[in-house]
Image (cartoon, rainbow, N blue to C red):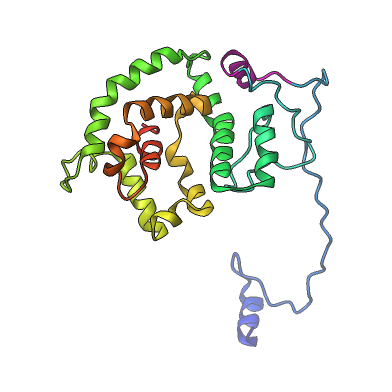
Amino acid sequence: MPKDIVKKAKNKGSPAGFYPYNPTPHPTTSVKYAPFPMPPPSPTGGTPTSSLSKFYDSDMGELTSPSPPASSESDVPVCLYCDQPLPPHPTAKLSQLLSSTALSPSSDAVARLCRLHHLEAEVLPNALSRGYPQSINWLALHGRVEEFLPHLKAILLDTSSTPEGARARCRFWQLLLKRILAAGGVSKAFEIGPEMSAVRDYWVGYYGEKGRAVLTNLLFKNFPQQQFKDHTDPVSWRRFIECVFVTR
């Protein structure tokens, strides 16, 4: 700092927020931080029973017995493929899928895994908190699909390029086209990377994997491949059904 400034500060007094130059370095101190407080262990020592496991017990018999909670010494676990948080108490089905996908991380396996952990971590708890039924009437789902069949058929058969066309007004068809364009082609659009970036666009809500299978089978029967395979360009008949219809 120039001497005249220091002198001025000494002679007239340092204004608020202004201090004369001091060449003496400040001593460095070693700051020790307290460890991050961790939640106390459960007083009962047992595995908590969540509403999620209750939902699976009542509707998806194969998805039972949630795994023990993660160790309190670790951070919140996240998915290795999409970096989204995993549920605190994953079901046995999700734990098994995590192990099998690690051994064979195909695009379909990874997409299936991410759909399931998103369902358990976010969709189901949110649905249960809003009072959604924990037992799904799968027979009633057939009737709901039949109500949409005329609308779905119009999307499938639409060949127009006008903004008023059925495909132009279909959100999931537009998402599929954007996905293909962003990836640079149909084959690249369904590789693991693009599959993960688009997987959240194709949830089926709290119906879960079982609901996805039910919806897919119903739509396959109502839109048979031999009859409609020439109307699904640029993707295959199966991809069209799964990405455009099942997600509605």
Rendering quarter of residue 155: top left
Residue at the farthest bottom position: 3
What's the residue at 39%, 33% (across, down)?
A: 247
Which segment did they paint magenta? 48-60
The image shows a total of numbered marks equal to 0
**Image position of 47 (left or right of 211):** right
Counting from the top left corner in percent of width and height, residue 71 is at 79, 36
What's the residue at 27%, 39% (across, down)?
A: 170
Counting from the top left corner in percent of width and height, residue 79 is at 63, 44
Q: Does 102 appear in magenta? A: no
**Image position of 121 (left or right of 175):** right
State which quarter of the image contains the C terminus: top left
What's the residue at 79%, 23% (across, down)?
A: 42
State which quarter of the image contains the N terminus: bottom right
Q: Is residue 205 above or below residue 49?
A: below
Residue at the farthest front position: 226
Counting from the top left corner in percent of width and height, residue 213 is at 48, 27
Rendering quarter of residue 147: top left
- Of 58 and 216, the residue lying toward us: 216
- Of 178 and 2, the residue lying toward us: 178
Counting from the top left corner in percent of width and height, residue 90 is at 67, 30
- Of 51 and 167, the residue lying toward us: 167
**Image position of 29 (left or right of 162):** right
Q: Does 59 appear in magenta? A: yes
**Is the magenta region chiefly helix, strand or loop?**
helix
